[in-house]
Amino acid sequence: RDRTKARPPRSDHHNLRPAAVCPETNSFVTRSFLIRYCEEEVDLNDSCRFRAELDLSPGRELSVGALMLDLELMFAELTPPAGEKPADPAEGADKAEFAPVSSLQFRLHRAATGLYEFCPVVFDEFHFCVANLVIQTVILDFRFRI
């Protein structure tokens, strides 16, 4: 074999799209990755920071402010249509249409008083996956408005 021929760069199947904040929906999207076999583990290690302002009017307790956290498991079909030559699945990731297949909603109690929680997120039995999630809230500033 001639080892001097340049090989095309291999795509990283665990990093098809980078993590990003979606400004249209004010949501965070982790990086997209390709699952190639059963029980495959992918370390995401993505993080995001949001800022929320809570109205603490007179007469309202600080612990009343509860935040809702919505999580969605997204899926996109990357196989080519019938009759087309199969290519590297990573090449079609930019054009892929992702759709939610499972969702969860969490209520973060006492978020206004500071919270540090570890939560293993387990989606439904049809789309079994575990995402270890760490949620941290902290009070950064108080502003009195008159």
Image (cartoon, rainbow, N blue to C red):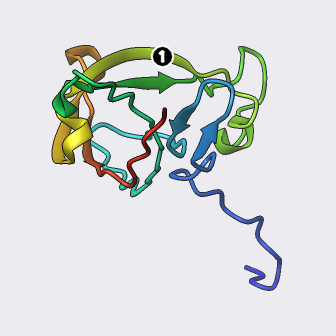
Relative image position of residue 106 (x, y in whole percent): 25, 23
Q: Which residue is drawn at 77% across and 17% down?
A: 83
- Alpha-carbon neighbours of circle 1 within 10 Å: few (<14), some, or many (≥20)? few
Left or right placement of residue 65 versus residue 95 in this view: left
Left or right placement of residue 24 versus residue 71 in this view: right
Relative image position of residue 140 (x, y in whole percent): 38, 55
* Up-down relation of residue 44 to residue 130 (above or below): below
Mark 1 secondary-structure assignment? strand
Pick the quarter of the image with the N terminus: bottom right
Residue on which the image places disc 1:
100
Q: Which residue is drawn at 22% across and 21% down?
A: 59
* Up-down relation of residue 105 to residue 138 (above or below): above
**Front in this rendered view, residue 10 or 1:** 10
Relative image position of residue 64 (x, y in whole percent): 20, 24
Q: Residue at x 31, y 49 (%)?
A: 41
**Front in this rendered view, residue 58 or 40:** 58
Question: What is the quadrant of residue 24 in the picture?
Answer: top right
Left or right placement of residue 30 versus residue 127 in this view: right
Question: What is the quadrant of residue 132 in the picture?
Answer: top left
Relative image position of residue 87 (x, y in whole percent): 72, 39
**Front in this rendered view, residue 87 or 11:** 11
